[in-house]
Image (tube, rainbow, N blue to C red):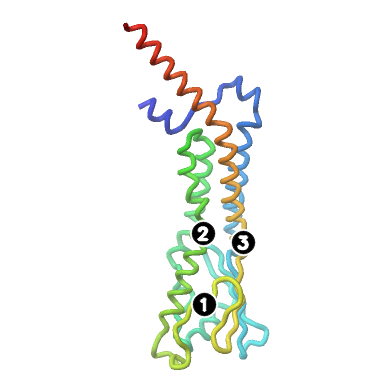
Amino acid sequence: MGRVMESLIGPRVPVVELRARPWRYLTPTFLFMAARVLLLVSIFFPYWHMELEAPQYPNGLFLTAYVNHLSGDVREIDGLNHYIGMRPLGEAAAFERAAAVWMIIAMFLLVEGAAFVHSKWAVVLAVPAILFPLGFYLDLVYWMTTFGQNLDPEAPLSSSVKPFTPTVIGEGGIGQFKTYAEFGNGYWMAVAGAVVVIVGFVFHRRAYKPLAERARMAAAGGAGGAGGGGV
């Protein structure tokens, strides 16, 4: 059982080695720490913005999506969407918004755990944080497509608006409505966190792979010596 745990957790750094090359082993730890901070702080910043231009609203309508709630002119946009048969925005990604903060906290803890695992299995712990920005984007695409392609045929303007896929990023629109969408600072923090994690693993591998190989060679040598002594 001890060998199994050692293979999962990886070799410990000898005190002499740590004193001789402290930054070799501290660098991945600091990078993982920076990634965790970026991920956690992103909760408090917008992940996505959209501006909608409509004849009834010359100054435009604005929608901002955080990981756990929507803000801005949600009611007004829902009112316009009602005429073309689109469901209220609050019905989109309800589960994701409810679970988002807890999911990010879990990813925070997993990346923290990765800093203490000195083997290749550390990557497994950090995979959710690395893929999180992509997951957010794909989930946004899914809900925008679902809402746009499933319009209520009984809506007042259903005969003049065909099902469509709203533009997730960039300029788009339908009929007299124009939209401009972009990612917010929170999303880019999550992206930066994912990139920092990947960079952290470059230094993680450079620091701990030699120790793991040295431990394997020592174990192989010890096994060979024991086998030789038994002859």
- Whichever of callouts 2 and 3 sits on the residue coming sooner in the sequence is 3
Q: Between residue 1 and residue 45, name the one nearer to us.
A: 1
**In the displayed structure image, the side of residue 136 where residue 151 appears, left or right:** left
Provide residue 225's location: percent of width, then percent of height. Answer: 40, 11
Q: Which residue is mark 2?
A: 134
- Whichever of callouts 1 and 2 sits on the residue coming sooner in the sequence is 2
User: Label for residue 166?
Assistant: 1
Q: CA distance from mark 1 to mark 2?
A: 18 Å
- Whichever of callouts 1 and 3 sits on the residue coming sooner in the sequence is 3
Residue occupying image coordinates x 62% and y 65% = 184
**In the displayed structure image, the side of residue 214 where residue 1 appears, left or right:** left
Q: Residues within 10 Å of mark 2 (few under 14, many from 20)?
A: some
Dividing the picture into quarters, in which one does residue 200 lie?
top right
**In the displayed structure image, the side of residue 229 where residue 32 appears, left or right:** right
Residue occupying image coordinates x 47% and y 86% = 82
Q: For the residue marked with disc 1, what is the amino acid?
A: Pro
Vertical placement of residue 217 versus 126, above or below: above
Q: Between residue 152 and residue 66, name the one nearer to us.
A: 152
Provide residue 230's location: percent of width, then percent of height. Answer: 32, 7
In the picture, the quarter occupied by the N terminus is: top left
Q: Which residue is mark 3?
A: 45
Dividing the picture into quarters, in which one does residue 64 lie?
bottom right
Q: Residues within 10 Å of mark 3 (few under 14, many from 20)?
A: some
Q: For the residue marked with disc 2, what is the amino acid?
A: Leu
Nearer mark to the viewer, of 1 and 3? 1
Q: For the residue marked with disc 3, what is the amino acid?
A: Phe
Q: Between residue 42 and residue 167, name the one nearer to us.
A: 167
In the picture, the quarter occupied by the C terminus is: top left
Residue occupying image coordinates x 47% and y 87% = 84
Residue occupying image coordinates x 49% and y 75% = 89
Q: CA distance from mark 1 to mark 3?
A: 23 Å
